[in-house]
Amino acid sequence: MQILIILSSADPEIKWNAVRFGNFLLNEGEEVAIFLNGPAVELYAGDGTQFPIAEQAKLFALSEGALAA
């Protein structure tokens, strides 16, 4: 199944969870794309030890997930 996640929040926890959810779906064999809209275009803003967005985004890209803005 093809799944599109639309992310439009600047909140680091929401961005982190959206990418984690994308990674979960990829591990289940789904085709996943994440569309970054508005303030979410700055995906790595808020990256840190509590919400490692960059780590999840790297895993997403290496698992053949698609990011679009």
Image (spheres, helix red, strand yellow):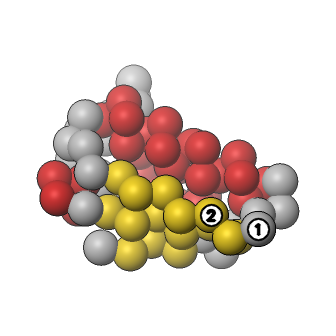
Q: Which residue is drawn at 83% across and 62% down?
A: 29
- Circle on res. 36: none
Figure quadrant of residue 26: bottom right
Q: Is residue 60 left or right of residue 37?
A: right
Query: Which residue is identified by label 2?
Result: 3
Residue density around tag 1, few if under 14, some if 14–19, many if 20 or more, within 10 Å: few
Relative to 50, is 17 above or below? below
Q: Quadrant of the C terminus?
A: bottom left
What is the distance, in whole Å, between disc 1 and disc 2 at their CAs?
6 Å
Determine the secondary structure under disc 1. Answer: loop
Which amino acid, mark 1?
A: Met
Q: Which residue is drawn at 32% across and 63% down?
A: 36
Determine the secondary structure under disc 2. Answer: strand
Q: Position of residue 11 (x, y in %)?
A: 25, 34
Figure quadrant of residue 63: bottom right
Q: Quadrant of the N terminus?
A: bottom right
Q: Where is residue 50 in the image (x, y as percent from the top left)?
A: 39, 24
Q: Residue at x 51, y 49 (%)?
A: 19
Which residue occupies the extreme left position in the image? 39
Contact? badges 1 and 2 (CB < 8 Å): yes
Residue density around tag 2, few if under 14, some if 14–19, many if 20 or more, within 10 Å: few
Do we see residue 42 in this rendering? no
Q: Position of residue 8 (x, y in %)?
A: 27, 51
Q: Position of residue 6 (x, y in %)?
A: 40, 57
Q: Is residue 54 left or right of residue 29?
A: left
Query: Which residue is identified by label 1?
Result: 1
